[in-house]
Amino acid sequence: MTVTPPANLRELFLGFLSIGARSFGGVMPWAHRVLVEERRWISQEDFTSIVGLCQFLPGPNIGNASIVLGRRWFGIKGSAVAFLGFFGLPFLWVLALAALYADFAGVPAVKRVVVGVAAAGAGLFIGTALKLARPIARKPAALVVVAGCFIAVGVGRVSMLLVIPVAAAISYYLSKRGLL
Amino acid sequence: MTILVELGLFFSLLSLLSVGGMPSVIPEMHRYVVESKGWISHTDFMEMFALGQAAPGPNVLITSLIGWKIAGVPGAFVTLIAMCGPAAVLSYWVAGVWERKKDAPWRAIAQRAMAPMVVGLILSGGFVLATPGGAPDWRLWLIAALSAAGMLATKLNPLWLLGGGAILGGVLL
């Protein structure tokens, strides 16, 4: 399969716009579809490695991918254009939805439904965590780090500003010793 | 005005901590805006989270909804820019280094070190959202458990699982 980078900034903008605009229920599948299948800007292997990098970086994964790819093709201008294309429409829609919701938030039935959606969303987080945990499930040291972070942040409600540096130091040490 | 500055500073900090994306920092966001500052209630937080999940687009937009709830449209802009900006600058810079150091040993070590932390943090996010005020509510836990199971066992678009949550919420809560 041949890959051809976007010809100009306009094309780059429209490509990322179409990812943001369509990504109901998750961005990743749409990013793959647009970048690899429809527009053929990058290869499958390239997509996997960029997603891997962006999961490791702080910030929204595909938001970061827009920065990384925009930079590759058009430098800093490309980063800005891809990022704005990606966020533009979803930002407007989410605000419109919130404004609409504000009119109905007082209705108890609506509130129950929305809290149900949030609980299901919490379940999606748990499902995601379990998926990510599969490759490390047989490593006792990794499970200790998982449990430590969960107990401190989730149950103990200790600030992440404290937990992250400590956990990162311990985790890096364990990883260096080949335990992760 | 001061609240916008506070939001901007806090979310800029969160931005740099958000390894693995927005889900990792949900517990800290909740701790700050609900528990520590009391700007919004747990229910408000849940509602904004639900809207953000159901709307199209990256889930980081939940932060702009929380900003909107706290400080209106300016709050929405400030939190989103603060949440994305510092991480974007870091990504721009790291992308170059990362590509050049493809074979450096610390790269693989760092990547493996990150995985269990991200798992623990995202798990915390799910737990905090489904446990208002630290008080267990079996109905919320049931909905969360069913949706997690549905995600792991099927290839359904997550929107269906959120829809299931909507129905169960209407019936059970």
Image: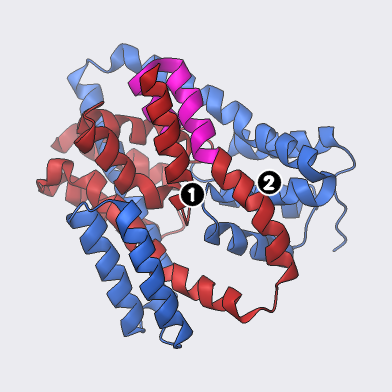
Chain colours: A blue, B red
Within 10 Å of the Cα at label 2, are there few (<14), some (14-19), or many (20+) other Cα atoms? many
Residue tagged 1 = B16
Foreground residue among A129 and B118: B118
Chain letter of mark 2 equals A
Outermost residue, top side? A103
Q: Amino acid at mark 2?
A: Ile
Q: Is residue A42 visible?
A: yes
Residue B5 in percent (x, y) is at: 42, 25
> Could you confirm whether marks 2 and 1 are on the same chain?
no
In this rendering, the answer to whether A112 lies above or below B97 is: above
Please state the extent of the stretch shown in magenta in the rendering. B63-84
Mark 2–mark 1 distance (CA, rounded to whole Å): 15 Å
Label 1: which secondary element: helix
Residue B86 in percent (x, y) is at: 55, 43
Residue tagged 2 = A67
Foreground residue among A41 and B41: B41
Magenta stretch containing residue B87, yes or no?
no
Label 2: which secondary element: helix
Q: In what quadrant of the picture does the N terminus of chain B appear?
A: top left
Residue at point 60% right, 50% down?
Answer: B90
Q: In what quadrant of the picture does the C terminus of chain B appear?
A: top left
Q: Amino acid at mark 1?
A: Leu
Residue at point 46% right, 17% down?
Answer: B73
Q: Is residue A121 visible?
A: no
Q: Is residue A69 left or right of residue B173?
A: right
In this rendering, the answer to whether A57 lies above or below B114 is: above
